[in-house]
């Protein structure tokens, strides 16, 4: 079981959290200017890298807040977590 550090509640079991997928995806400023393929890329295409990956997590069984986590998809090791308002600064390392 993964232990995930919520920036507000501290380290908790993975079962208290829900993963929201890849972090850092920005909604296009002018969606009408996009082709159908570009819009589909925005909606559905994700990087799914092997190695370091930034993800959104929600502490759904705790404070219910969203935050970012950098996790290695091969080793599952979590490099750190950060509140989304911080931009990308880790609140603690493991
Ligand atoms: Zn929390």
Image (tube, rainbow, N blue to C red):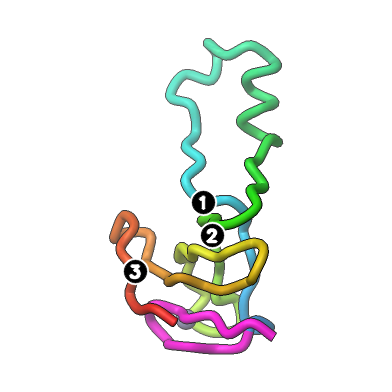
Q: Is 4 on the left or on the right of 79, as rendered?
A: right
Dot placed on the residue nearer the N-terminal end, 1 or 2: 1
Viewport quadrant of the C terminus: bottom left
Q: Residue at x 68, y 35 (%)?
A: 45
- The stretch of residues the image draws in magenta is 1-13
Q: Is 45 on the left or on the right of 9, as rendered?
A: right
Q: Is 44 on the left or on the right of 70, as rendered?
A: right
Residue 84: quadrant of the picture: bottom left
Q: Does the stretch in magenta take in 2?
A: yes
Queried on whether the Cβ of the residue with tag 2 lies below 8 angstroms from ligand 1, the answer reads no
Q: Residue at x 66, y 27 (%)?
A: 41
Proximity of marks 3 and 2: CB atoms separated by less than 8 Å: no
Dot placed on the residue nearer the N-terminal end, 1 or 3: 1
Please name the residue that numbered disc 2 is placed on.
56
Q: Residue at x 69, y 17 (%)?
A: 37
Query: Which mark, by number, is residue 90?
Result: 3
The residue lying toward the viewer, choosing from 90 and 50, is: 50
The residue lying toward the viewer, choosing from 36 and 78, is: 78
Dot placed on the residue nearer the N-terminal end, 3 or 2: 2
In x, y percent, where is residue 4?
Answer: 54, 80
């Amino acid at each position: 079981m993964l232990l995930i550090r919520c920036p507000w509640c501290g380290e908790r079991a993975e079962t208290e959290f829900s993963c929201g997928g890849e972090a850092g995806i920005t909604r296009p400023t002018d969606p009408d200017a996009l082709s159908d393929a570009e819009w589909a890329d925005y909606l559905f295409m994700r990087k799914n890298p092997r190695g370091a990956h930034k993800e959104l997590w929600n502490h759904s069984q705790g404070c219910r807040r969203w935050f970012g986590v950098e996790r290695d998809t091969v080793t599952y090791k979590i490099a750190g977590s950060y509140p989304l308002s911080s931009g990308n600064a880790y609140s603690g390392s493991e």
